[in-house]
Amino acid sequence: MNFSIMLGGLITAAPYLVAWIVAIIVAVIMLRRGGGRAERFLLSGSCLMLVSTLFTVPMPAIAPWLVEGGASRVEAASVISGFNLFRGLVGLVGILCLVYAFWIKFKVKS
């Protein structure tokens, strides 16, 4: 049962995973061609967003696994809440890195 739930999570997250992998590849190519600080932040933000997206794959399977293991529904909800908070923080830091990368790249030089 948990495998099918995780497979569903993987199918749901697949387009985002592909997009972040492409962004990482583009950032690495830009860095190898002499990229600077903005490209490093683009790579960091893309990697963090990929990790955040990877964290969403097992999310639907954690609660049933905990309940089957003997945890109460309240304890399972608490674990899910903490896991989701951590995933959200990783995503927030990733977004901040991406915004900062674009701000560095396209700011008007005075």
Image (spheres, rainbow, N blue to C red):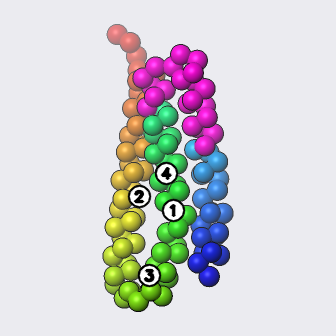
> In the figure, 90 relative to 34: above or below?
below
Q: Quadrant of residue 84?
A: bottom left
Mark 2: give few (<14), some (14-19) or many (20+) Cα within 10 Å: some
Provide the residue designation for mark 4.
Answer: 51
Residue displayed at 55% across by 64% down? 57
> Disc 3 or 4, which lies upstream in sequence?
4
Q: CA distance from mark 2 to mark 4?
A: 8 Å
Is residue 99 visible in the rendered image? The answer is no
CB-based contact (under 8 Å), mark 3 and mark 1 = no
Residue displayed at 43% across by 31% down? 41
Mark 4: give few (<14), some (14-19) or many (20+) Cα within 10 Å: some
Provide the residue designation for mark 3.
Answer: 66
Q: Which residues are magenta?
A: 21-41
Residue type at mark 4: give it.
Val
SS class of the residue under badge 4? Answer: helix
Provide the residue designation for mark 1.
Answer: 56
